[in-house]
Image (tube, helix red, strand yellow):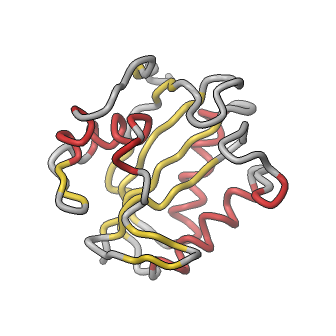
Amino acid sequence: MPDVLIALGGNVGDVRATFRKAIANICGMTQAALLARSSDYSTPPWGEEQQDNFINACIEIETSLDPHALLFTLHKIETKFGRDRKNEQRWGPRTLDLDLIAYDDVTLDKPELTLPHPRLFERAFVLAPLVEIVPDRVIAGRRVADALAGVSADGIFRLPDLD
């Protein structure tokens, strides 16, 4: 089955509780096996900076869904947790953001889906949790740990585990 990396983010509500429920939904709705889950990280906002810090994490799953069906399902889960993509501010506050980062070694460039994620290597808030679970994974010719070393991780810190 394909090995998939998904980034989770949010800064509205009890984000860590949302992550727990969203991951259960991802696994259930995609019939996926959860291979790894990073810690949660506090991260400064990116893009629109006048908002609360985000919490970010990443998961690695195996699923038989194709990339488009998986993306559709991720968007359904976001909606279930209160996200309204049509009426939100770009890079603004949100309850849940699920980004499909990599799907095996698939490369796609379509209006609805680009793989690997086009801004992956600019985003320490995604790379830091990825390094925790797949430091040696090569995406688009770059090792994840090397990619993190090439960007600023200022203001990003690992949150303590929840009991």
Q: How many marks?
A: 0
Left or right, residue 20 beside residue 122 = right
Image quarter where the N terminus lies is bottom left
Q: Quadrant of residue 158?
A: top left
| x, y percent for residue 84 | 80, 55
Frontmost residue, 123 versus 96? 123
Residue located at (46% from left, 28% from top): 41
Q: Quadrant of residue 25?
A: bottom right
- Where 25 sits versus 8, above or below? below
Left or right, residue 105 beside residue 108 = left
- Where 9 sits versus 60, above or below? above
| x, y percent for residue 92 | 71, 39
- Where 131 sits versus 120, above or below? above
Frontmost residue, 92 versus 74? 92
Residue located at (66% from left, 34% from top): 48
Left or right, residue 103 beside residue 99 = left
- Where 64 sits versus 117, above or below? below
Residue located at (46% from left, 20% from top): 159
Residue located at (74% from left, 51% from top): 81
Frontmost residue, 121 versus 125? 121
| x, y percent for residue 88 | 79, 49
| x, y percent for residue 8 | 53, 46
